Image: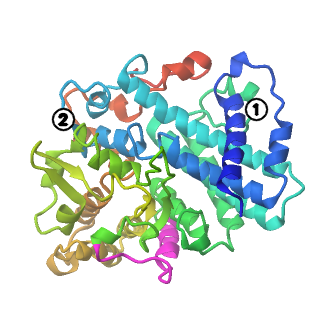
Amino acid sequence: MLNKRYIKLIILCLGYLLTISCEDFVDLEPPNYKMVTETVFENDETAMAAITGIYNELFSSASFSNGYISSVTILAGMSSDIFETTSATDTRYGPFQQNQISPRGTPDASANYELWSSAYNIIYMANSVLEGLSNSDQLSEETLTIAEGQARFIRAFTYFYLVNLYGDVPLVLTTDYSKNAVAPKDSAAKVHEQISTDLDLAISLLEEVGEYESLERTNINRFVVMALRARIYLYQQNWEKAEEWSSKVIDQASIYEILQDLDQVFLKNSREAIWQISPVPVGRRQTTYTREGYFFRGINSSRVVLSNDFVATISPEDKRLAHWVGYNSSREFYFPQKYKDGSSSGNITEYSMVLRLAEQYLIRAEARAMQGNLPGAISDLDKLRNRANLELIANTLPGISQEDLLEEIMEERKRELFSEWGHRWLDLKRLQKTAEVLKPIKPLWQDTDIFYPIPEEERAKNPNIEQNEGY
């Protein structure tokens, strides 16, 4: 195996490619990075180390994915009805809560820029890997196949958040800085088409990769891709396909299961986990905990808290209230405690959860309900309600209507997936319920607030990127 120092060297090489491709397009002469790519992709070990480098980047430096101050989890949670600030004058998170984000010159604009730029940084890294693989004749077929499948998934995964948060965005599929520097926005439909293409290719490429390396659920296998594919089909309202692909994941009973102990769900390599991101040791103390755990249980826990209105929607008998919601009695606020560890050193117990089995049951429940299979949808929904110690719909409301059942599914999504990857914000948008739900509690709401503004730093570098409406 490669030692950690060598892996860091590979990451630096990718970082070099990233920098010349992403940061200062107009100021640079065409760079000569041929030797860098040849070094990274000269053998199977270094090629796979490049993928490991992206995994590490998703936790350490990529703001959109690391669960910390400018992540999708925090910012999109603020934009919905899940989080709120403890200060009326909070300038970083308050504008996200009120859906009044500035494109320039303010703390909230900085958070928005970090979200946008870090996502594109990951896309550039994935593009660098894909180009390096295509130009190498020294790698085994197995490495080429696995590395391409994983890189394509990472690119699709990242674009999923960009297109859902910003709408039309530049579709960048190369490291060619001269093209990227002037790339205009592409339609959301075109971006979705590329996401689907990448995921379908990834499923094919990873067809034989069904288990996890070293039992760690941090590498991408075909079931990881299938899980995201099911979500994409749900967002596209292709109910039949959403049911089909979520079922492919749910049926892997030897790998995945809904854990009855809620305190076990977010542990590293939990059997409910489909894909997790492993924390990278940082600092002199080599602290090894999730950024989510640190943010909500550490020094920042008083800036972003759970909305009292949201907490009130969780009934007292719901086990999630006791196990996944904490209460600060001295400051009188609620906070997420899905992650229990926010300060350990050298004893990692939790990984950041990205995709988990509970979502697949909720995807299938909604898809079945939309197709008129109400008993099947109820069965899926009751799987999670039973775990939460709630009365089963099959017993209490066996004749529930389709409309009421869909509403129950949406409420269950809110209670089950809160503080995870902005699910609630994206659900409200895809179901066109943002104004209905948010306008009564956010007096400054405008319909154009469904998309975040394009950061002005990006538009200053590339005037071909038009600003989103309303900013």
- As displayed, is residue 204 above or below residue 430? below
**Which amino acid type is marked by label 2?**
Thr
* Distance (Cα) linking label 1 and label 2: 44 Å
- Relative to the observer, which residue lies in front, 239 or 55? 55
Q: Secondary structure at mark 2?
A: loop
Mark 1 / mark 2, whichever is N-terminal: 2
Q: Position of residue 171 (x, y in %)?
A: 63, 37
Q: Residue at x 66, y 72 (%)?
A: 209
Q: Is residue 249 magenta?
A: yes
- Relative to the observer, which residue lies in front, 399 or 143? 143
Q: Quadrant of the N terminus?
A: bottom right
Q: Quadrant of the C terminus?
A: top left
- As displayed, is residue 30 above or below residue 224? above
Question: Farthest residue toward the right?
Answer: 137
Q: Which mark is residue 176?
A: 1
Q: Is residue 387 visible?
A: yes
What span is in magenta? 240-261
- Dot 1 and dot 2 residues touching (CB under 8 Å): no
Q: Position of residue 146 (x, y in %)?
A: 71, 63
Where on the picture, by quarter, is residue 74?
top left
**Which amino acid type is marked by label 1?**
Asp
Q: Position of residue 397 (x, y in %)?
A: 17, 75
Quick check: 44 left or right of 213?
right
